């Protein structure tokens, strides 16, 4: 009754994105702790985040965060609104749509410095 | 045996699982705001190539940003580790394996919380702050 339906996919995606975000949180707490070793060491760590591959990884993280956030709101609406269960599938589709809508501007801003045809950043040009 | 749930019907009884159920929701709502602001500050209004030591030093001159980051650290870690606890409860059946995994998760929570908190508290705006952007 549950297997294979929309509820299963939203449940699975919530769990997988949650664990993925947690894994990144561990890495992130460690890379921020490099602050204690001064500007040279910390900025070397930040240089990693500037690479194209890690920019793409950051984007996938942002997609996971947005989906987890919007689906989290959906879960709370199901919990606290009497008609929530009735509209769970519609709300899952809305959560997916909002994730894509939120993802696009982040993708443009994050990839602009490495894609020459997107000139929106002024911060990277200043030395 | 399925002990805990982070999803679905609120556990009855008023014990730890009920507290966990509410904690997921309250911390979740706060994290939506904290995380989205954090992502915009680090990736949109400033490019990640300019989130250097100098950028952090300027931000941390204001103690409210340290408080913001500490709230983000604490809530994200507790929300995420509570989620990991639910996942371990769901999939690991053996008593010994459960004990090892749950105590490892507890220890990791404490270690990462302390590492993050110490980093936030001990950061000092030194004379040499390095470059504003990497390139």
Image (spheres, helix red, strand yellow):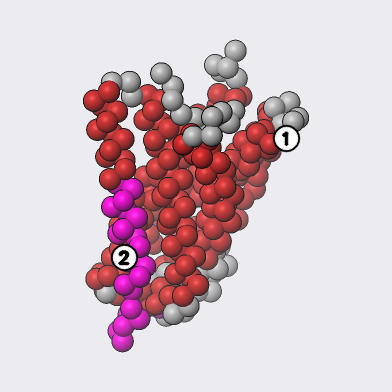
On what subunit does the disc labeled 1 rest?
A
Quarter of the image where the C terminus of chain A is located: bottom left
Question: Does A114 sit above or below residue B121?
Answer: above
**Is residue A32 or residue A55 the one in the foreground?**
A32
**Is residue B63 or residue B14 the one in the foreground?**
B14
- Mark 1 falls on what kind of element? loop
Quarter of the image where the N terminus of chain A is located: top right
Magenta range is: B108-135
Considering every residue shown, the one lying at the far bottom of the view is B127
Q: Could you tell me residue B83's position as x and y percent?
A: 44, 38
State the residue at coordinates (52%, 44%): B23
For label 1, the residue is: A81
- Mark 2 falls on what kind of element? helix
> What's the CA distance linking mark 2 and mark 1?
41 Å
State the residue at coordinates (71%, 31%): A84
- One can see residue B44 in this view: yes
The answer to which image quadrant residue A83 occupies is: top right
């Amino acid at each position: 009754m549950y297997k294979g339906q929309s509820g299963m996919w939203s449940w699975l995606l919530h769990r997988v994105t949650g664990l993925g975000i947690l894994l990144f949180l561990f890495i992130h707490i460690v890379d921020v702790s490099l602050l204690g070793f001064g500007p040279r060491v910390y900025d070397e760590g930040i240089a990693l985040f500037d690479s194209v591959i890690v920019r793409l990884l950051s984007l996938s993280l942002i997609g996971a965060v947005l989906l987890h956030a919007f689906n989290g709101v959906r879960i709370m609406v199901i919990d606290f609104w009497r008609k929530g269960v009735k509209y769970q599938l519609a709300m899952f589709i809305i959560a997916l749509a909002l994730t894509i809508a939120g993802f696009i501007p982040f993708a443009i801003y994050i990839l602009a410095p490495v894609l020459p045809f997107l000139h929106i950043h002024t911060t990277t040009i200043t030395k | 045996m399925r002990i805990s749930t982070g999803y679905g019907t609120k556990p009855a009884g008023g014990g730890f699982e009920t507290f966990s159920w509410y904690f997921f929701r309250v911390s979740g709502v706060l994290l939506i705001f904290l995380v989205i602001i954090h992502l915009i500050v680090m990736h949109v209004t400033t490019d990640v190539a300019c989130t250097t030591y100098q950028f952090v030093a300027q931000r941390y001159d204001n103690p409210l940003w340290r408080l913001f980051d500490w709230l983000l650290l604490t809530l994200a870690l507790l929300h995420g580790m509570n989620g990991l606890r639910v996942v371990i409860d769901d999939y690991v059946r053996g008593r010994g394996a459960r004990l090892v995994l749950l105590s490892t998760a507890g220890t990791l929570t404490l270690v990462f919380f302390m590492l993050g908190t110490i980093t936030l508290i001990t950061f000092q705006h030194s004379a040499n702050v390095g470059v504003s952007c990497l390139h």
